[in-house]
Amino acid sequence: MMKIKRPTALILLLMIITAMAACSKKPVSNNETASPTNSAPGYSEYVPEAQTEEQATMLPLEFDKNAAVELGDFESDVYGKLKVFFQEDRLFLFDEEGAKRFELYAYSYIPNYEGTPVELNGDDVDFDGHTDFYLLYSQGNLNSYYCFWIWNMEKRTFEYYLPLSSVPSPELDPEQKRIIASDRISLDTVVTTEYIWNNGKIVPVANSERHPNPLEVSDEETTEGTDSSVAVIDGMLLSSVIMREDPDKDGKWMCRIEDESIVKLSSSTLDRLSGSRTFIFRAVSPGTTTVVLRNAEVWEDESAPQRILNITVNRNYTLKIVVVE
């Protein structure tokens, strides 16, 4: 009988043990899948897929009116008046009876972020006959941006619609059923894009560029030689008035607002190269107030050239400026 050398015997023994271990494993059936594992620290065996904007997971949160920020209300065609609150990372919507109707994830919305005023609007954004709502989340000197929640009648809830949050200064055209974006990339350049709804999504259908020269709106000079021409750029929440100003003269254009509960002066800046001063007015609440612009060294000089404006803030917080005299 042939003898097996000791190293060869060990190898055979290991092969037998390996084969027996493989046979003892339960096979994976056609209806089962192997669970992914990762032995590295900090990993779990199950890694969930990234959440979409419709699938945001909200941890339980008890509404606390003292900790919440009241954003306003809007008229829903389904639930009547709904009052909206912000708390932590979500929106709470209550009806007039005080019953909580909706608890929605707030996504990127933060009240008063970087000085942006709270503005809540209710309107039929997708032109389906039902009221949606949107919140101002960013306001610059040229453009404004909003977070939109669109009513889904089938699911009977409001759904966040991300693409509209990047549309600058949107305006609704219910007659043409279009959303018009006015991207003011500078004081004299406006890019306009028109969107329609198609299968629940916004689709751009038209694009144009305008180059208005606001300083050519009027051409008036007073007897003192001061150019009192007025350039007006109406907008939503912010509007601009531009006056010619000689930076080498002592006098400058100053501003007085009759009722600052309606409109406030956001900024006053002089561009020495163009010789123009820009007043930017910010809407506070609906109404009409008078604004006086006076070109003088001191405001008390009532003989100095001046212009009088009426500024109206509409219910949707668009501003309309009319030169009275």
Image: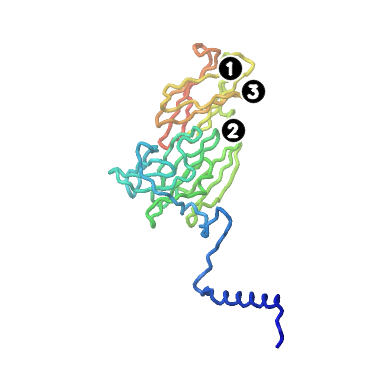
Disc with the residue nearer the chain's start (1 vs 2) = 2
Amino acid identity at mark 2: Leu
Name the colour scheme: rainbow
x and y percent of residue 102 in the render?
36, 48
Q: CA gap, disc 1 to disc 3?
A: 16 Å
The residue indicated by pointer 2 is 187
Residues at marks 1 and 3 touching, judged by CB atoms closer than 8 Å: no
Question: Closer to us: mark 1 or mark 3?
Answer: 3
Amino acid identity at mark 3: Arg
- The one nearer the camera, 202 or 230, is 202
Give the class, few, some or many, for how many residues have Cα within 10 Å of label 3's Cα (few <14, many ≥20).
few
Residue at 47%, 42% (x, y): give it: 109
- The one nearer the camera, 277 or 163, is 163
When the figure is inspected, residue 319 is found, relative to residue 121, above or below; the finding is: above
The residue indicated by pointer 3 is 272
Q: Quadrant of the N terminus?
A: bottom right
Amino acid identity at mark 1: Thr
Question: Circle 1 — which element?
Answer: loop
Question: Closer to us: mark 1 or mark 2?
Answer: 2
Question: Circle 3 — which element?
Answer: loop
The residue indicated by pointer 1 is 226
Compared across the picture, whether 175 is left or right of 230 comes to left
Disc with the residue nearer the chain's start (1 vs 3) = 1
Question: Circle 2 — which element?
Answer: loop
Q: CA gap, disc 2 to disc 3?
A: 15 Å
When the figure is inspected, residue 319 is found, relative to residue 200, above or below; the finding is: above
